[in-house]
Image: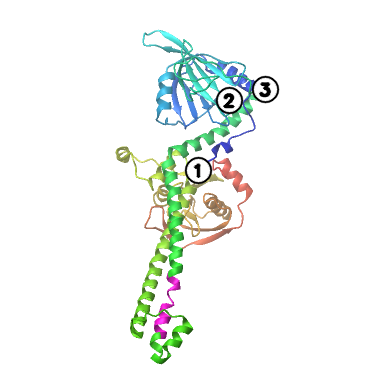
Amino acid sequence: MLKKNSENQISKSVKMDADLVLLIAQDLNQKISDNFISNVTILNSTDILLSFSFFRSDKLFISLDHNYPRIGLLKLEESFQTLDGNLSSNLRKELRGCRILKIEQTNDDRIIKITLSELGSDFLRHQKNLYLEFIPHRPNLIIVGENNRIRFATHYNQSATTRQIKRGGLYSAPSLLDYQITKKEHDLERFYQTLKEDFSVSIKKRIAEKFAPFFTFLARREKLLLKKEEIILQELKVAHSKLIYQEYGNLLLSFPDEDISRILIENKIPFDLEKNRIANANHHFIVYKKAKRQIEFQNEELLRIKEEIKYLNHLKIQSEFADEKDMVEISSSILNDKNGKEKKKKAKQKKQKNINFINLNETKIFYGKSDKQNDELTFKIADFKHTFLHISTSPGAHIVIAKNNPTEEELLFGAELALILSKKNDGDVNYALIKDLKKGNKLGLVVLKKYQTIHINKIRSASIEEFEKQGIIIR
């Protein structure tokens, strides 16, 4: 899960200084000038993608991350839906359909100026400028009209005394006083490679923001359950201390009246002087029975809380390996679907299988990334002779080796995958034939009628390399 402190994961090996910005501007000018901006996609609160009419193989990735702003062309096969909001509506209004005339560095600083041509309401073409300021701690995207008046900015600063950024105000470049220019060589290809790596962090940030209600719910619910668990443990401690009241009652009934005073003093037995010995004994039995019932009830409640906490942790682990489509399934298991109509509409359409797998010597090993995928994989896709693997005693991903009689190496590799997807480096993994499974009473829950166990002391480094090579990111 991305989630917090995602900026710490961003590559710091190549920083954008004025020299690198110049190289990027020259490269962009050569590649995407004379293109029309066909689409604007808001990935998250700081990152943007621009698509082009002719240069379709690449998209322009613009990040206004507070600590590490950056820009560059990326080859992206997948497409993303823009996140709705003021930023999306304003940028689409200002940029879509504009023709790129020129891209250049400005003010010899970490600023790129993109000169655009747009068709106005008078059906004539007008020029405007898009300024991208990649200055750490104060990055900005500013759109300026022909009269050098600011039409839009991602960050306004109307109260500044030196450089105001306000709608309708004049645009001026920031001062160079905070930046020392140093001429040095830069490898543009290396920078683009780190940019590609950083993009995965941007997507994680997108997921964190888009599914923020889900992650907030998990955190708040776990906090509430832990507090409730603490209260129950305190109540159990008190209830257990009252179990001795049974002994108190028995002692009151076991000795004659002349010995009662001695018994009360020796055993520190509470005694109501307004009641006789029998009434006091009956009262103590009532206290004991009430404490016993409370212990039974609280133990059941404690077990339920522990199971729910375990399930919440299971969802958090699933989220670590989930993409955006997976997160829809994972979050829907907790939150009510706000798009009910859309869900019903999609339910009428033919369902497409979206099950992940990796290859080991031409053998496919499937794995689920949500409870829904786990259930579909195990009970709808897998053959009854295929082998099922799952970590022992804890929720986790369903692993299916799509082969009859898998080898020992394939079983070991599948067991390691089960541990990795549960954020573990060692432990027991149970395996069984699909025919020896039956559905549990919850989605993704499986009962193994007959199984064997593999114990993993430590996941092999070669296996971890293979997982990462095939797209499973180990954190």
At x 43%, y 90%, the residue is: 259
- Residue 17 seen in this snapshot: yes
Span highlighted in magenta in the image: 239-251
* Within-10-Å neighbours for mark 3: few <14, some 14–19, many 20+: few
Residues 261 and 147: in front is: 261
At x 48%, y 48%, the residue is: 316
The relative height of residue 247 versus residue 366 in the rendered view (above or below) is below
- Residue 58 seen in this snapshot: no
Asked if marks 3 and 2 touch (Cβ < 8 Å), the reply is no
Asked if marks 3 and 1 touch (Cβ < 8 Å), the reply is no
Q: Counting residues from the N terminus, which is met first, the one under dot 2 or under dot 1?
A: 1
Nearest to the eye among marks 2 and 1: give it: 2
Q: Counting residues from the N terminus, which is met first, the one under dot 3 or under dot 1?
A: 1
Q: Which residue in the structure is indicated by mark 2?
A: 135
* Within-10-Å neighbours for mark 2: few <14, some 14–19, many 20+: many
Q: CA distance from mark 3 to mark 1?
A: 37 Å
Task: Give, as a three-letter code, the residue at label 2.
Answer: Ile
Q: Which residue in the structure is indicated by mark 1?
A: 1
Q: Secondary structure at mark 1?
A: loop
Residues 46 and 294: in front is: 294
Q: CA distance from mark 2 to mark 1?
A: 28 Å
Q: Position of residue 311 (x, y in %)?
A: 44, 54
Q: Secondary structure at mark 3?
A: loop
Residues 407 and 8: in front is: 8
Q: Which residue in the structure is indicated by mark 3?
A: 180
Q: Position of residue 95 (x, y in %)?
A: 44, 19
